[in-house]
Image (cartoon, rainbow, N blue to C red):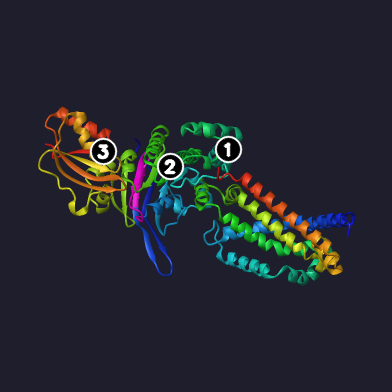
Amino acid sequence: MSSKVLIEVRGLSKIFADAENRVTALNDISLQVQEGQIYGIVGMSGAGKSTLIRCINRLDTPNEGQIIYRGQDILAMNRQELLGARRKMGMIFQQFNLFMQRTVAQNIRYPLEITGVSRKAADQRVAQLLDIVGLQDKARAYPAQLSGGQRQRVGIARALANEPDLLLCDEATSALDPMTTQSILDLLQDINRRLGITILLITHEMAVIRQICHRVAILDGGRVVEEGDVDSVFRNTRSEAGKRLFGVLPQQASEDPDTPSLRIVFDGAAAEKPVISKLSQQTGVFVNILSANMNHLQGKTYGQMIIEKPRDPAENAAVIAYLEGQGLTVREVNTP
Amino acid sequence: MSWAQLWPLILEGTWDTLYMTIPATILSYLIGMPLGLLLVITASDGIRPKPAFHSALGVVINFLRSIPFIILLAMLFPVTRLVMGRAIGTTAIIFPLIISAFPYVARMVEGSILEVDRGVIEAAQSLGSTDWQLIAKVMIPEALPSLLNGAAIVTVTILGYTAMASAAGGGGLGAIAITKGLNLRKMDVMYAAAIALVILVQVITIAGNRLTKKIDHRKR
């Protein structure tokens, strides 16, 4: 992976103010997104993440700071330059925001129409994009006739039409059911890998970060409270906000046990009970639970469980393989 | 009055009514539609905020809208004479009809365009649309069903105004109902003209509704 910085946010601040109230939505945010990365910004609602991503293409105007994109400050651009930059950044939305009076093909065609791509070239490009998002048979359908997942696929195709180098995702899976979320995440990962498009996404779901992001920033109260590679942030969550998002209660923040053990992170993607009992059935290994700290929210399980690490390396490997196969994150702790 | 006498009268009245209504509707859209769009884009949360201009335009539109047509008709006599060559008659009355209707059209258009989901406009902005592209390719097409429905309402309103044409020597079904019906105590003429007006309004309304449904792809 290339290590060139595609977009750099420097000292970004945004204050919403009216006669009575002053709300600091973003407070001195700085971060760098490398070319080819999937960069996730996660936070509870009200953390400022939506404002942040909307500042990147200036749908919102921050009060202070710089956004350097390919060596140019987006916030200092004139209208013409801004249009050019926007045409190189696609964006997808939680509510899809499709043109309701245009067919799927016409939606995808819109960015090509406004940049003056010839009819023939546009036809080809639309066909290609329909293929990428797997909607070849829906070209003539209207958005109202599509499911949520299909609508987001149209949104993705539309965002990719002008071959952008950056895709901004504003809670792109938050309006979708878990299965559809999975297929959209797979598609985004595929686009990142195959087309080399850098992705900057915001979400309130840790599961999204864990599944496709390379790097993560945790936003809380308009500040970046933690930033790093997804793996290391997962293994060693330091911020209160991060622990909350992982479902660990602050006062019970997991102290590592003395014995070699496995830490299992439940981030809402898998159920708790069947996993542990099935683990024993499937692998034939009986695990010893040392501690567990679980929260149940809307039928999903968040939290951590510490189990004793099986002595036998083969059994250990089987346990880890099974748990990871269930979509859980497993880390060895206290391993000599 | 016999049918043979009534028919030509009603047909002539219908023709005169449409002769006033249709050009007045088209011309008031020519003026009112751009103004409605201007109201939307210059609003403080619009794509080109110009708050001072926006409120000034709003004041003028509200002022014109608050004058009842029959009063405006009389007030405009000198101007109408200047513009149309004469102040009274079926053709001359088209001018005050336009002046009375375009502010109404501006508000109707403003309402329709504001119905377009803000997120859809933002999506178009995020793709690098110019302001003109936003207006011509997103706002108007996305609002088209609502604009069409509004046009049917505007047409019916202007049709209603034409009934007051007799006050300025104009023709049409309204004038027939009053001058050749009520004033001469020929109630059959008055009722016949009124029924013809009702049928016209029904036709316009139903046609408007059908067309609106046909072109709207939001629900299916």
Q: Secondary structure at mark 1?
A: loop
Q: Give the residue displayed 78% in from the left and 71% down from the top.
A: B74
Q: Give the residue displayed 27% in from the left and 35% down from the top.
A: A326
Chain letter for mark 1: A
Q: Can the viewer see residue A42?
A: yes
Question: Mark 1 — residue?
Answer: A117
Estimate how packed mark 2 is, as few (under 14), some (14 to 19) or many (20 or more) residues with alpha carbons within 10 Å.
Answer: many
Q: Is residue B60 left or right of residue A16?
A: right
Q: Amino acid at mark 1?
A: Val
Question: Mark 2 — residue?
Answer: A166
Estimate how packed mark 3 is, as few (under 14), some (14 to 19) or many (20 or more) residues with alpha carbons within 10 Å.
Answer: many
Q: Are marks 3 and 2 in contact (CB under 8 Å)?
A: no
Q: Are marks 1 and 2 in contact (CB under 8 Å)?
A: no
- Outermost residue on the top side: it is A314
Residue A227 lies within the magenta run: no
Q: Are marks 3 and 1 in contact (CB under 8 Å)?
A: no
> Which range is magenta?
A30-47
As measured in the structure, the alpha-carbon distance from the residue carrying label 1 to the one carrying label 2 is 20 Å
Residue B189 picture location, percent across and down: 84, 61
Tell me which label, 3 or 1, sits earlier in the chain: 1
Residue A210 picture location, percent across and down: 30, 41
Q: Amino acid at mark 3?
A: Leu
